[in-house]
Image: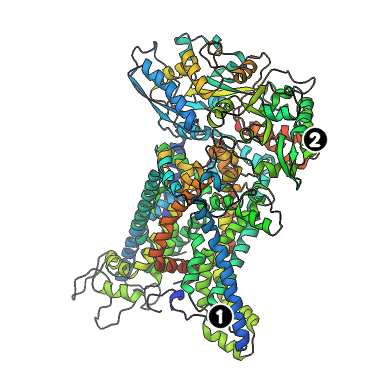
Amino acid sequence: MTAVSQSPLARAPRGTAPRTGRPRGRTLVWIAEHAALVALGVLTIAPIVFVILTSLMSSNQALTASILPRPFDFSNYARVFTELPLAQWFGNSSMYAVLATAFMLVSSVPAAYALAQIKFKGANLIFTVIIVAMLLPPQVTAVPVYVMWSQLHLTGTLWPVILPNLLGDAFSIFLLRQFFMTIPKEYGDAARMDGCSEWGVLWRVVVPMARPGIASAAIFMFFHSWNDYYGPLLYASENQAAWPVAYGLATFRGQHGTDWSMTMAMTVVVMVPVVVIFFFAQKAFVEGIALTGVKG
Amino acid sequence: MTDVTTPETGSLEARPTRASRPPASAGSRSTAPGTQPRRRRSAESRRRMVALTMLAPALAGLVIFFAYPLVASIFYSFTRYNQLQEPEFVGLLNYRFLFTQDPQIWPAVVNTLWFVVILVPVRIVCGLLVAGLLSRAKTATGFWRTLFYLPALVPPVASVVAFVFLFNPGTGPVNQILRVFGIDGPLWFNDPAWSKPSLVIMGVWVMGDIMIIFLASLLDVPRDLYEAASLDGANGVQQVRHITLPTIAPVIGFAAVTGVIAALQYFTEAAVASGVASGKATIGGGTAAQLGYPGTSLLTYTELLYQHGFANFQFGYASAMAVVLFVVTAVVLVFTMRRISVFRPEES
Amino acid sequence: MHPSARRSTTRILTATAVAAVGALVIAGCSSGSSADTIDKTAPKDLKGTVSLWHFFTGREARVVKSAVAGFEKANPGVTVDIHAGQDDEKLQKAISSGQNIDVGLSYSTAIVGSFCSSGAFRDLSPYIKRDKVDLSDIPKAVQSYTQYKGTRCTLPALADVSALMVNKPLLAKAGITTPPKTLDELKADALKLTTYNADGSIKQLGFNPLIDFYENSPEHWAPMVDGSWLDSKGNSVIGTSDAWKKLITWQKGFVDEIGYDKLKAFTSGLGQEFSADNAFQTGQVAMQIDGEYRTAFIKDQKPDLDYGTAPTPVMDGLGNYGSTYIAGNVAGIAKGSKHPELAWALLKYLSTNTDAQVTMGNGLKNIPTLTSALQSPKLEVDENYKTFVDVAGNADTMTSPGTADGAAYIGTFTKFWQAYQEKGGDLDAKLKKLDSDIDNANQLAGP
């Protein structure tokens, strides 16, 4: 087995797809391909550009045919924070995402390690059950779980979506296990020979080597929590003080009529943290995604 | 069981008795079946204990949030329960309503299947095409990859809100641009015939998450295969058919299965699109009042479940719907899990 | 399977079974508390915090706040903790999960049936009897929709009625001197007032006949034909009634004459109902059926609009001109309320105190549900608002009955009508199906 695998995206030489024919044909193909890329790129970025442009318009102008704001009005961004409790919603989203990620790591890293690196009877069964749990629609278990949380008097808050991560998150365990399996057993065995317990192997040998994978899982969990709409809808909709930004964005604009330019400003504000984090954590991110589907 | 300690280090764990033996995975020594030394069995069971301890929170989570609710859902599905009074046993009433009487069940099922059959393949094909393009690009690949992935990063709620605005039939940029070309654009999110296709367009916009795994997989196909095929006279199309596709088939399978499962539970995008497009103030009415707008075209199965369960507080009926959804998902899983290598535990 | 694998499977299954049984036992003990016994006499001094959940937002929420301030002034030891923007869905979520909610003020009459039968709102009769509250000041129709099958679990806190609103300059320009009184006149006037662009699309609409536009709804249109909903057993009579059939046929004819697609395209470009670009306020729609609160929105958002009001037009021979559909805000004491006496005091204040009703009536421009408040000189009644006050007091004014499933049947009816106005079809067969759908759903929800 190779050393800790790099994502194929990082190590493959560029342009490994099949080549066709003569040099002139190749240039034409190159032009066609890049033209297509540019066209698709424009189509991809266009919605985001429109959203940003609209957020800089005054509310009246947003509903008109003009594409460029005249004048550029930055006040929407201030209004979004003063007219709505957006800062509070940001705080809620952050708390949700940070805590969910932290809890997930605590519960899921050891679990994934056990499934990946410790050979014991029942491992396969447990893994299969986890896969099923991961793929099952949450609505299947929604009603009894809701009843449970409301009897604990925790509805109206975000705790019902945060706390379960203390007991493991199926997708994270799956992802982490994929990554742990790429770490050769020899390292662990050497440590065991030196008298390390399994916990020791986990903390001192595997985790340091698995930092990219753990970072990927953490980032996935963070984004999943940040983007979550269904969970807050179910559990926190009646308490505006507990809304996360995703829910606030979808719901608030419906209460009296849409102020589109302000709504677009809110949309931009909601998108920014995600994009920023992505840029800083790109490598870990892309590695993680590749892990989910590429390697067996 | 007593533990055997060796003179060298005094540790309790089983390991090769001679330090010169090269490190090997535990359990790789061959012994005749049924004659495992006691030391090995105790080490194994100790390993199991450690593993189970590490798995303990996850196992507890599986019981509390997976196994118990499944059983409880089945129980509730035979009752009438609104959480304010005790559950009242009603036999098959909920199932009878579900299969024969609910006027919204048929639109909900059809809509959900529509997304399964249309959204999933369209996203996969588009993801493949873009990944294919990207895999051939030699310059600025990181830039392109990031660019196409960006929409997938955007929170789904934000994407939907943005798209409903962009596709606003009267004042949105899309129809305005179409008007320039003399085309009278449809009502998009306000037209029952166009609301689902509009969501598919959005689904294509965010195909970056699928595209990336396809890209990684395409780049993983060994170059020599292509070169050998070229030498044998295979042209581009043949190479794709006989080399590329078979090699990346597992990834396509993975994307298909996860896509289908996601489509079966399609909720957020449809719910937010209906709410934003209907523009109705949610004063008094609540979220569920707009589910499905326009008409019932965006009403999915899980939305209907939410409406019955959490807007009308008919937990019994919602549980019946949940049980049916579970059965359908289970059938899909049973038939596909074996084929998707990533889901097979034996892979190591 | 290897023995220890089987052991672990068994272990997991056992754990599941134990957890399942245990949790089902817990679930069985729902959040219910047993019968509500109340104190023998009303407490002399009220102290503490009581939470009020209501659905209003923005300007309207401020009005409620000022009314509540009156209550706090009269009871210095009490603070009211207000949660605004809570719709019926959220009220039910809060009550059933035992959150801190004492008084719930709901937007619609719809929940009375479900909240009274499920016990989400407590039975108020012990309190009414003990404190000798006289309900005769509340109009009869209003009394009827605030109770369900003999259980009174809510008291009314202002109501809504609807009437016809017309844009005076536009009508004058078209030569129409008085607002239409019959449906035939309405359609004729509307067509006269409708103008088109060069490409055939609608420029200005006389009256929007689409049933899902703004306040066009089966409830608000019911007075046109004096339509009835359910019989005494709770079974749907909508499908078998001649009145509804005639109305739906009339409406479909109206829609088809202008064109469904044109109407749909025009409607999707209109401003949102409660925003400043409300289509009536901008003049894009010349006549509409709307609630009395619209006068407050106009005063706030477009005070220079020259408009008039008149009772809802009726179909010749079927409707009673001058009547309307009344439904309103209802308030009750939540099931698990920890401060029932404070809640009762606040509830009593909001629903039986004439001054409170006048304050809220003036601020929200909703119709007070006390006859004394309706007749109070302090109630601001201008010429336009007077129409609403008059129709509210009309003897033929109707409402819609509650069911244990709330107003789900009206939702079913509306969806049916939306589909019919677009696609048409065999109206008799569809009406029959509508009745059976409503009856099936009611059966699912229980008595």
Residue C228 in sight here: no
Viewed as shown, does residue C282 lie left or right of A287?
right
For mark 1, name the chain: A
Mark 2 residue type = Gly
Residue A174 in sight here: yes
In the image, residue A78 above or below residue C98: below
Q: Position of residue A105 (x, y in %)?
A: 35, 58
- Residue at mark 1: A17
Q: Position of residue B339 (x, y in %)?
A: 56, 68
Q: Secondary structure at mark 1?
A: loop
Within-10-Å neighbours for mark 1: few <14, some 14–19, many 20+ = many
Q: Position of residue C330 (x, y in %)?
A: 53, 23
Viewed as shown, does residue B126 lie left or right of B145?
right
Q: From this viewpoint, which residue is outermost toward the bottom?
A: B231
- Residue at mark 2: C253
Report the Cα–Cα distance between label 2 and label 1. Answer: 62 Å
Viewed as shown, does residue A232 lie left or right of B28?
right
Image quadrant containing the C terminus of chain C: top right
